[in-house]
Structures are given as structure tokens and as C-alpha cells.
Image (spheres, rainbow, N blue to C red):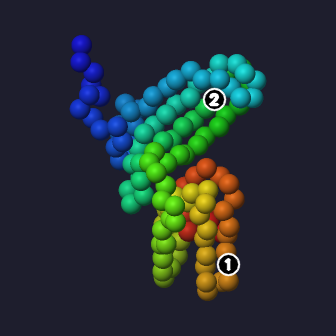
Amino acid sequence: MASTTENRPAFTALSADDAENQLTEIESLCMNCYAKGHTRLLLTRIPYYKDVILSSFECDSCHFKNNDIQPAQRVEAYGILITVEVKTSQDLNRQFVKSSYGTIRIKELDFQQEPYGENGLLTTIEGSN
């Protein structure tokens, strides 16, 4: 019997309609209590960013949970500079992914947020400060 995923690309744009079909669940070790837990993996493409691996771990024994986002391809050594001009309050709702090495600067407010070690953060311009 042929698999329905043979002709589908590994990384597809995230869509609420078909995310259930692309979800992979594997049994994995809980690093909190060392019992068996479950990890769900979703390979997805974030538009204008890159391919990422979304993972969600849950342990039925101790109820430990962990969520993570990791790049699925090489991260450039020097990164990129993105400049956004905020003209309306709606502009503050723009979403972006900040890596664990990313710095946010707002020159007009003399504000700078240094990297703080999270693996990857999906946030908005408003939520970043």
C-alpha cells in the first residue's frame, strides 16, 4: 500500500486545515522524571523566514511539558538586518521570529533588547519590548 506522504514535500506552509496530517508523534524520554513521554513534531515553512521544526513534548507521568522551535536549515553566521517603519498601531501586530541570537533595537526610543537564550520566539513588534 502506497503512503499518502510520498509526493508531499517535507516542509509545507503552516495551515490550520492540514496540520493534523503532517504531525509526527514519537515516544521519547522525559528529562524530568525519566519516564516515557510523547514528542509531537511538525515540519513547517514560515513565510519570509525559513523551514523550522516545531516540537511539543508532554510526559504523562509527571506532566512536564516543553515546546520548542528550531531551524531546519543552517543559520547564517552574521544574520540579517530587518528594518521596519511603524506608522500605525496595526504595524505593532506584525509577527516575526526572533532567534536566540537576535537583537532588537528601536533607535527612536533608545531601546535595545539583547539575546536571551530562548531557542526561537514567535512574537510581534509590540510583544518584543
Q: Residue furthest top?
A: 1
For badge 2, the amino acid type reads: Glu
User: Where does the image place residue 33, in percent across and percent down from the top left?
Assistant: 76, 24
Which residue is located at x 44 percent, y 48 percent? Answer: 73
Tag 2 secondary structure: strand
Of callouts 1 and 2, the N-terminal one: 2
Q: Nearer the viewer, residue 19 or 80?
A: 80
- Looking at the image, is 7 positioned above or below residue 118? above
Quarter of the image holding residue 114?
bottom right
- Left or right of 28? Residue 10 is left
User: Where does the image place residue 54, in percent across and percent down from the top left?
Assistant: 51, 41
Asked whether the viewer can see residue 123, the reply is no
Which residue is located at x 27 percent, y 35 percent? Answer: 8
The residue beneath circle 2 is: 58
For badge 1, the amino acid type reads: Phe
Marks counted in the figure total 2
- Crowd band around label 2 with a 10 angstrom C-alpha radius: few (<14), some (14–19), many (20+): many
Tag 1 secondary structure: strand
Asked whether the viewer can see residue 41, the reply is yes
- Crowd band around label 1 with a 10 angstrom C-alpha radius: few (<14), some (14–19), many (20+): few
- Looking at the image, is 22 positioned above or below residue 81? above
User: Disc 1 and disc 2: Cα gap in Å?
Assistant: 37 Å
- Left or right of 61? Residue 39 is left
The residue beneath circle 1 is: 111
Q: Nearer the viewer, residue 97 or 127?
A: 97
Which residue is located at x 48 percent, y 42 percent? Answer: 53
Which residue is located at x 42 percent, y 58 percent? Answer: 49
User: Where does the image place residue 74, in percent across and percent down from the top left?
Assistant: 46, 51
- Looking at the image, is 30 positioned above or below residue 86? above
Q: Nearer the viewer, residue 126 or 44?
A: 44
